[in-house]
Structures are given as C-alpha cells and as structure tokens.
C-alpha cells in the first residue's frame, strides 16, 4: 500500500497543534499538582490552627488534662460531618482521653502515628475506607508536656476542588486544541501562500517565456530570499538559452549557404558529366543533402520561433483549400506506397491565421502520416467545428501509433519513437507543428485509434 506524502501545510498544522497540545497537557498536569499541593498545605494550616484552639480549651488539673472551655467542642464542624474537623487527645502514655462527637464510632488511629514531644507532625491515614489528614501536636500545660492533641480532616474538599478543575480542563482542552488547529491552519495557509504563488509561477515558466520573473517580496524573509534565488536562476537560464538559441540560429543560417552551394555544384556536375558518376551513389548523396537541408531549415525555424523573430501575418485563410492543396502536393509521395489520402467532410472554413504556417502545420502532419502508414493503407483528414470556438483538423493514419508514455514526449525536439528510428526524419516536425498551433492560440492532441494507427488533432480557435 502506497502511503500518501503529507503536504508542508499539513505538517505545519500537525506539528504546531501537537506542540500546543503537549504544552496544554503539561500545563494542566502541573497546575493540578500545584493546586493539590497548595490545598494540602491549606489543610495542614487549618488543622494546626484548629489544634491550637483545642489545646487552649485544656488545663492540667489534679494531675489530669481537663476541658475547661467546652464551647469549642460544641461547634458544628466538631459535632457533624459537614466540613468536619475531628478531635482526639491523649495523655503522655498515648492513651486516648476523649474525642469529638463526630468521631465517635470511628477507628482509632493512635497506634499508627509517629509522635514527637516537641514538634507538630502530620500524617494521612485510611480510616474506615476514608483518607483523613491528621495533625499531631504536643500538649504543653503548666510548662510541661502532658500529651497530644490530634485533629483530622477528610480530603473531600480537596477532591471536590480537584474534580472541578479536571472537569474544567476536560472542556477547555478540546476547545483549545480545536482553536489551535484552526489557528495554525490559518497561519500555515497565510505563511504558505507566497510559496504556492512562487510554485505556480515557476510551473508556468518554460523555455519560451524565461523573461517572466517572480515578484519581489517586501517581507525580506526566507521566502523572499527563495524568490530572489529563483529569479537569479531564471536570469542565468535566460542568458544560457539566449546563447544556445542564438548559436542555433547563426549556425543554421551559416550552414544553409555552403549546403546550397554543394547541392548546386553537385547538380551542375551531374548535368555536365552524366556518365562519370555512379547513379545510385549520386542519388543517395542528393537524398542526404536534402535531408540535411530540411534539418537545417527546421532548426532555423525553431530558433527563430524561440527568439520571437517570427511575426505571424494573420488574415482570412480557407482551411479546406490549404488541406486540398497539401493533399495534392503529397499525392505522388503517397502513391509510391499505394496510400490513399482521403479528405472527409471538409466544409468551407475561413479563420484568421498565417497562411504559410498553417500550410506548414498541415504539411508536416500529412508527411508523418504517410511516413508511418504501411503500404495499401489510408490517411484521412477532416475538419470538425466545436461550438463556434474551435476548428479541429483531424488527421488519422493506420500506422503503429505511439506508446502511452510517448504522448508527452512526441513533440520534444529530436525525440523519435521506436518505430520512427527506422524511418528517415529529424524529429523536429511535430515540434514545429506544436509551435504553429500554440502561436495561433490552439493546441495539439495525439490519440491512438481503437484498431490501429494514430489520430493527430490540431485545434485552432475560430
């Protein structure tokens, strides 16, 4: 199973939300622990204060600890379970002498405490399935240690406050995560917007519009640095392409002259010495010279197109007439392979176009169709109108067609498919056809026929 790669936007949202979630979780746990510790200290302070008040109700009379102020013992929190503060007190031998009314009937914890005759101690005990916090404070009366006063409280208040806090966090945490997700998504989208703009602009830059550059950003951040770097790269590419195109244009121009001279001299020599040269060799030489001339001519055309030296001269052009003329021009070539050039439904169609380049478009497609079609086959041509928007010039042959992956490659310069390697050609014809179609605002499409052969469609705007 192929795992889909996450986009940078998704990664930013995921990681930022995760960091916020971790921070909130740590903060929640830490705050709960701090609040719990604070409440426990508050309980200890209250127990110590209650114990001191209880000790003030004692006196040492007749060798015994006796209660001289009983009103303290009758307060509600010493007699009921509501906000209860339990009281026990012992003598010096740790024998219980009395307890508050609300602790009557409960288990005595006296045997489990660690007593200190000088300092107050705190201890937590499980009494009758209830955690109770105790304060054990020494009783000093008449200048001597007489026993211990013990007060206790449950953790109900602490647990209640803790439950409330956890409940609040249980509501706040999901809301905070949703807000963090939405916020990080908006921030990531805004942060990534310039990157997406750069990506889209660069995607639309190709060899024919290298003069296009990215807008300069005023943010002066990393994205602006990236845009500047890409602009520098485009500038270097522009200079390199310009040099290559200029070289191609100059080379093709310079080669035309000596090649024309060689052709003329060869023909003149053949006329003046008809029997002195081997005829097959002469014919092969002439074929190769013609092929070189065609290659140079095509290179010159593409070089001029790349450098915008070709200016289309658009006027009313009859597509049906151009197709008929080119069919007649290629009739002899097609007859040599017994190929039928068959026009189908060619209505009288007039468009605004450059007649010469439309002729080149039709000529190159017909030439390819004849080259790749087997003997005794048919090449059909038709014009189809689409909603007063396009005229589709459809050429179908019965050749080998092309492989699926070659659809994107077939118009690349010098690209030749496997069947094409056995047939003479330069690999530039369809590149020129594509340029002509696009220069007229149209497009080129290739599609294998259901049974055999290839259909080439040149769509030209009305």
Image (cartoon, grey):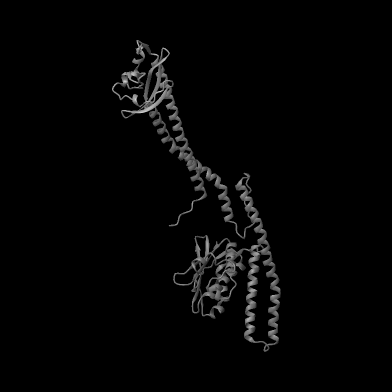
Task: Judge by depth and name the residue closer to the eye, 33 or 171.
Answer: 33
Q: Residue 48 appears at what percent x and percent y?
A: 42, 21
Q: Residue 310 appears at what percent x and percent y?
A: 65, 64
Q: Residue 72 appears at what percent x and percent y?
A: 36, 14
332 lies left or right of 253: left
Vertical relation: 120 (above or below) 400: above
Q: Quadrant of the N terminus?
A: bottom left
Q: Residue 199 appears at what percent x and percent y?
A: 57, 52
Task: Judge by depth and name the residue closer to the eye, 279 or 101.
Answer: 101
415 lies left or right of 175: right
Vertical relation: 233 (above or below) 96: below
Task: Judge by depth and name the residue closer to the eye, 317 or 422.
Answer: 422
* Residue 99 in view, yes or no: no
Q: Residue at x 53, y 43 (%)?
A: 187
* Residue 418 in view, yes or no: yes
Task: Judge by depth and name the residue closer to the eye, 193 or 388.
Answer: 193
């Amino acid at each position: 199973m192929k795992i889909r790669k996450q986009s940078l936007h998704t990664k930013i949202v995921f990681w930022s939300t995760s960091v916020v979630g971790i921070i909130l979780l740590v903060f929640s746990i830490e705050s709960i622990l701090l609040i719990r510790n604070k409440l426990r200290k508050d309980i200890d302070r209250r127990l110590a204060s209650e114990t001191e008040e209880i000790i003030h109700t004692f006196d040492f009379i007749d060798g015994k600890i006796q209660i001289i102020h009983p009103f303290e013992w009758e307060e509600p929190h010493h007699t009921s379970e509501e906000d209860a503060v339990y009281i026990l007190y012992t003598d010096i031998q740790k024998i219980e002498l009395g307890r508050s009314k609300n602790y009557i009937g409960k288990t005595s914890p006296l045997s489990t405490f660690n007593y200190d005759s000088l300092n107050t101690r705190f201890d937590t005990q499980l009494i009758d399935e209830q955690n109770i916090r105790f304060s054990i404070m020494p009783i000093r009366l008449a200048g001597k240690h007489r026993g211990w006063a013990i007060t206790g409280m449950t953790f109900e208040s602490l647990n209640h406050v803790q439950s409330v806090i956890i409940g609040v966090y249980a509501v706040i945490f999901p809301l905070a995560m949703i807000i963090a997700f939405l916020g990080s998504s908006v921030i990531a989208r805004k942060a990534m917007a310039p990157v997406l703009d750069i990506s889209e602009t660069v995607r639309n830059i190709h060899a024919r519009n290298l003069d296009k550059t990215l807008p300069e950003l005023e943010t002066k951040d990393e994205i602006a640095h990236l845009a500047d770097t890409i602009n520098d790269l485009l500038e270097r590419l522009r200079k390199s392409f310009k040099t290559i195109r200029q070289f191609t244009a100059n080379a093709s121009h310079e080669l035309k002259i000596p090649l024309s001279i060689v052709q003329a001299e060869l023909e003149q020599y053949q006329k003046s010495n008809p029997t002195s040269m081997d005829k097959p060799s002469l014919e092969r030489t002439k074929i190769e010279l013609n092929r070189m001339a065609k290659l140079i001519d095509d290179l010159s055309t593409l070089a001029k197109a790349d450098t915008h030296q070709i200016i289309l001269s658009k006027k009313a052009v009859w597509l049906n007439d151009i197709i008929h003329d080119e069919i007649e021009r290629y009739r002899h070539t097609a007859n040599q392979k017994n190929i039928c050039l068959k026009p189908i439904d060619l209505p009288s169609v007039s468009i605004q176009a450059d007649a010469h380049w439309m002729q080149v478009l039709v000529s190159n497609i017909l030439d390819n169709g004849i080259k790749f079609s087997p003997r005794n086959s048919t090449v059909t041509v038709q014009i189809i109108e689409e909603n007063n928007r396009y005229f589709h010039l459809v050429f179908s042959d019965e050749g080998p067609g092309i492989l699926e992956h070659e659809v994107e490659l077939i118009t690349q310069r010098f690209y030749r498919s496997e069947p094409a390697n056995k047939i003479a050609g330069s690999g530039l014809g369809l590149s020129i056809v594509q340029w002509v179609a696009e220069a007229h605002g149209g497009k080129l499409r290739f599609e294998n026929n259901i049974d055999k052969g290839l259909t080439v469609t040149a769509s030209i705007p009305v």
